Image: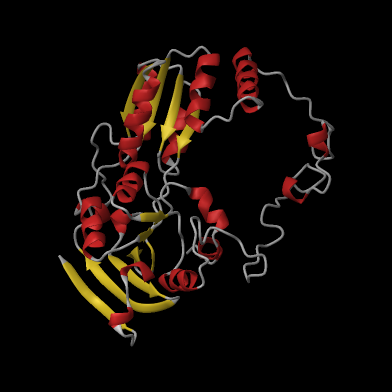
Amino acid sequence: MLHCISWHICCLNEMEIKRNEYMIYGIPLFGNRVAPRFTIADSILLIKILLDRIVYKKVLKIDEKSWNGLLKIFNDNNVDTLVCGGINYDDKKLTNDQGISVIDNVACSDSEVIEAIKTKTLKAGFGFSINTDNDLKLSSNIYTKKNKGLPVEINCLACEDYVCIEGKPCSLSSGLNPEPGSRETVQMLNSAMDISLENERVLCRISELIYFAIEMNYKKIGIAYCTDLAGPAEIVSQVMQRFFDVVPVCCKIGGKHLTDESFIENDKIACNPSGQAVILNRAETDFNVIIGLCIGTDCIFSELSNAPVSTLFVKDKSLANNPIGAVYSDYYLKEVTSTRVT
């Protein structure tokens, strides 16, 4: 079902409009912003541009949030271009196959995207950039912390010479005599360096994980995953099964209900990172991989795991699991810096 909740038409002789002269954009919205993912969108903004002028704007409220449903809406309204936040490869290809181009990874308000379309500045990644002239001011001592017994403040970001990169000690590191560590620690560092210093090829994170595990001679890999990322976890598991024995364990293992009264009426199942660790410890995994565990539960799992732990994917519900995107977005940085803890 579609419900038209706003409609605006500019005065223009419709006889002058020819199909090859105008462009129609379809933009899934969440509130008044471009939806990070279509699955959380509550409406679609349609914009028709003719000769650099907005002919009309139309907002459709959506009930069905399937990708095929979205494409039907676009085809019914002759949409030429989808403007969206995150989109996976299959959905993007399906959209392109329908003759609809895609401008993805857009993070801004509906008014900002309209202005970008009018000024022809809209492109993939729009909104993920920092304007150095804006009014966002981060405190100069945001990373500074004084510790008793140390002669200087700990703030490598404030360092002006970075002598460590030249292989020289700095005032902060004076007196430190790092131990070589265990045999496994030394092997880990050597394997990590082998991968990171490769010049012949640039590896994605999954490839780095596989190469690292092979160099470490790991045989059995555990995957501690969040049920929200069960799809990606299954794909990773299938890929890694070509090289290792893989033991995937979900965060809801044990089916424990939350006891907090505020959740009882929703019948929520608690995350169980300690249970994940126990299961993988019993399986005697050589190495465990985190996929999408919530902040806090990942700490518990890492602490209780007998095997070394590395995070492959993190979960970010607002940024399509791309948390680093917030660093390049004025909107999200302002949101973070204005947050007040009560």
Say if 197 sits above or below 83 in the image: above
The residue sitting at 54% across, 65% down in the picture is 334
What colour scheme was applied to this rendering of the protein?
A: secondary structure
In the picture, measured across the screen, residue 41 lies left or right of residue 156, that is left
**Residue 317: x and y, percent?**
39, 51
The residue sitting at 30% across, 63% down in the picture is 79
In which quarter of the view is residue 81 placed? bottom left
Say if 207 sits above or below 264 in the image: above
**Residue 104: x and y, percent?**
43, 54
* Residue 19 appears in the picture as rendered: yes
Say if 215 sits above or below 122 in the image: above
In the picture, measured across the screen, residue 99 lies left or right of residue 310, that is left
In the picture, measured across the screen, residue 17 lies left or right of residue 180, that is left
* Residue 23 appears in the picture as rendered: no
Q: Which of 286/118 is in front?
A: 118
Is the N terminus in the top left, top right, bottom left or bottom right quadrant?
bottom left
Number of numbered labels in the structure image: 0
**Residue 28: x and y, percent?**
33, 62
Say if 340 sits above or below 301 in the image: below
The residue sitting at 80% across, 40% down in the picture is 172
Q: Which of 185/317 is in front?
A: 317
Q: Which of 62/163 is in front?
A: 62
**Residue 235: x and y, percent?**
34, 30
The residue sitting at 25% across, 57% down in the picture is 70
In which quarter of the view is residue 252 placed? top left
Q: Which of 177/239 is in front?
A: 239
Which residue occupies the extreme left position in the image?
1
